[in-house]
Amino acid sequence: MHEVLRDWDGENALISYDARTQSHLFIAVHSRRLGPAAGGTRLKTYPTPADGLRDATLLARAMTYKMAVAGLPMGGGKSVLAVPGELSPADRLHLLIRHAHNVATLNGSYSTGPDVGTTSLDMDVLHAHTPYAFGRSPARGGSGSSAPDTAVGVFNGIRAAVAHLNGDPALDGVRVFVQGCGAVGEPLVGMLVDAGAVVVVSDVVAERVEMLVRKYGVTSVAPDVLDVDCDVYSPCALGQVISADVVPTLRCRIVAGAANNVLVDHEDGARLQQAGILYAPDFVINAGGAIHLIGYEGLGWDSEQVAAGLVGIGDTLAQIFTTADDQGISTEQAAERVAEARLAAGPS
Ligand code: PPY
């Protein structure tokens, strides 16, 4: 764990161990340069505790960049609850309450929200112990699940990428492979089908795939298949799917999905560029959830303002694609430069 922290450029990390559930609790605060840090709570099993801490630190950094590019007055943070396996409801509740107390000790320098493995109902639990939890259920005063708005942002981003290559954002007949059809992937599939796209899906949960095939008439591939012949590959499950080994096997023109930390290495952005694949940087295209949570709950936005923010994802990507072309750099680099310029300028 020392090495994880040594190799990270964040502000601080809170680390604790819960003996009852044999779980590690991590909160990583990467940067508060643009405002208090925010980012979801991921509840998941990792090979080692250090892997959980590494995930928290890298996801927190991605949140800093996401907030900066989206123009939200927030910093980047993330929590990981690294559990040994499925917890009983009572143990899970115990762990969430312990996490809430950890969040509370940070006195608002970090706020959390839902992420992989947690829901609005979990935020209701956290909020009973700390005010610093976004994304409660509407019945408890929250703005509800941000996943559908994350999907809208990804949809807008896919249109921007298609427009950059085709000169037209129309998705009619465009082949899109959506990998992972959970809370974000499913509504995305619905929007794509409505827009006339030819959609291929995959998911580790076979029943989910069967449901989508029945509901939308899409086709499917096995969960481990990546080399689907398509225009757009949309990773909407977990990250780290693009690596030096994977890039040569891809048969798409665009990579544009909702997953966080899609690239294994920073250099994979350049590898995609060299392979002639247009990459929509993850921290730009998946900002819809943050725009929803911070917009509604932090900034008091109405649904029109949130919708405008989601449209902005497409506009920002269009600019990043053009800058990357003009300067001969990868889209990942172009997006990082936007974030780093905002961080250098400080809060606006
Ligand atoms: C993400 O976009 O990955 C998030 O974690 C969303 C978020 C944003 C702000 C507070 C909590 C979660």
Image (cartoon, rainbow, N blue to C red):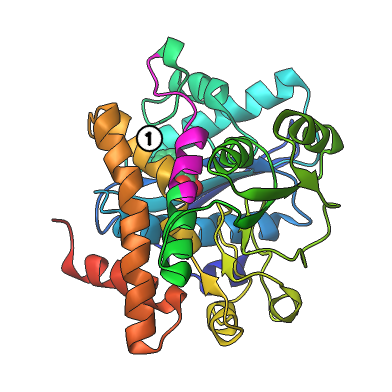
- Relative horizontal placement of residue 277, taking residue 77 as reference (left or right): right
Q: Please tell me which residue is depicted at 41% across the width and 25% down the height of the picture.
A: 130
**Would you say the beta carbon of the disc 1 residue lies within 8 angstroms of ligand 1?**
yes
Up-down relation of residue 320 to residue 289 (above or below): below
View quadrant of ligand 1: top left
In the rendered image, the residue lying farthest to the left is 348
The C terminus, quarter of image: bottom left
Q: Quadrant of residue 108?
A: top left
Placement of 338 over or under 131, stated as above or below: below
Residue visible at 42% across and 63% down in the picture: 163
Query: Which residue sits at x=74%, y=34%?
Result: 212
SS label for mark 1 = helix
Q: Residue 247, image x and y in percent?
A: 69, 77
> How dense is the environment of label 1, judged by Cα within 10 Å: few (below 14), some, or many (20 and up)?
many
- Residue 87 lies, in percent from the top left, at 77, 29
Q: Which residues are magenta?
A: 141-155
- Residue closest to the eye, 341 or 34: 341
Q: Main secondary structure of the magenta part?
A: helix
Q: Quadrant of the N terminus?
A: bottom right
Would you say residue 279 is visible in this rendering?
Answer: yes
157 vs 82: above or below: below
Residue 67 lies within the magenta run: no
Three-letter code for the amino acid on which mark 1 is drawn? Leu
Q: Which residue is mark 1?
A: 293
Is 294 in front, or is 191?
191
User: In the image, is residue 152 part of the stretch drawn in magenta?
Assistant: yes
Where residue 265 sits in the image (x, y, percent)?
60, 76
Quarter of image, res 160: bottom left
User: Can residue 9 be seen from the camera position used here?
Assistant: no
